[in-house]
Amino acid sequence: MKYAIIIAAAAAVALSGCMTTPTSIVQMPMSARPLTSAQLQAAPTNGAIYQNAAFRPIFEDRRARQVGDVLTLVITEKTSAVKAGASSGNKSGSVSASVPHPLQSTFGATLAANNASKYADGDNQSASNTFTGTMGVTVVEVLSNGNLIVAGEKQVAMNKGVEFIRFSGMINPDNIATGNTVQSTAVADAKVEYRTNSQIDRAEMTSMASRFFQSLLPF
């Protein structure tokens, strides 16, 4: 019994420590490095002068085009949903029967019974979420049609907690505005997440693990 208690306590501590790292819906690299000079030289040439990998339009602001380029993402996510439902119904019934003549002096000429029921039910639900902010993202892949796969992560440590902001998605270069910025609402296959790794989260996770292992203890 002594060893069982020690093992349970050790497992509780281990699990509570492992569970403090928040999970992520963004399952891809958060950044990418641009091609080196050697890689550019090894790549097939496009012409004697023109090189697609290093092409920058003369009359255009500097914007993200190649792997490793950085652009500013403006997060303006807002969602709302409303759901309502209602139902009602009623039911009634009656029955009557004639009483035999010998019993009419006691029960009367007829017996009757009536029944009625009615119900009504309604429910309203609403939810709204707003997420705004800015962060830098990196081009991690350039597709054959010119679209850009971008991803990025921002970590902010405050006191005893860390905030994680992660993003990934596909951008049409035509949607990149002046200042090398793009709105999150113009990103396809966007995945935006905000997670925390704070003392509050750790306390909740530790409490769940502790309650499980405490249920195994004899006291």
Image: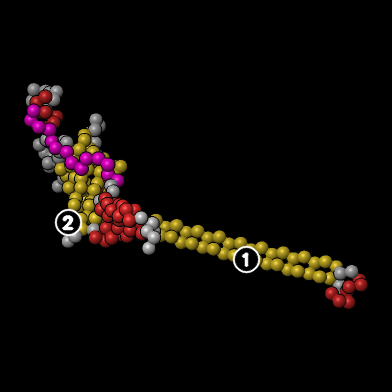
User: In what element is the residue under mark 2?
Assistant: strand
In this rendering, the count of numbered labels is 2
Q: Is residue 179 visible?
A: yes
Q: Residue furthest right?
A: 102
Judge by depth and name the residue closer to the eye, 18 or 55. 18
User: In what element is the residue under mark 1?
Assistant: strand
Cβ atoms under marks 2 and 1 closer than 8 Å: no
Left or right of 4, for residue 48: left
Residue 156 spot, x, y in % from top left: 18, 55
The residue under label 2 is: 157
User: Which is closer to the viewer, label 2 or label 1?
Assistant: 2
Q: Are there few (<14), some (14-19), or many (20+) residues within 10 Å of tag 2?
A: few
Left or right of 109, for residue 116: left
Judge by depth and name the residue closer to the eye, 219 or 53. 219
Judge by depth and name the residue closer to the eye, 195 or 183. 195
Q: Residue at x 14, y 37 (%)?
A: 33
Quadrant in the picture for residue 9: bottom left
Range shown magenta: 25-38
The residue under label 1 is: 118
| 165 over 53 or under it: above or below | below
Q: Amino acid at mark 2?
A: Ala
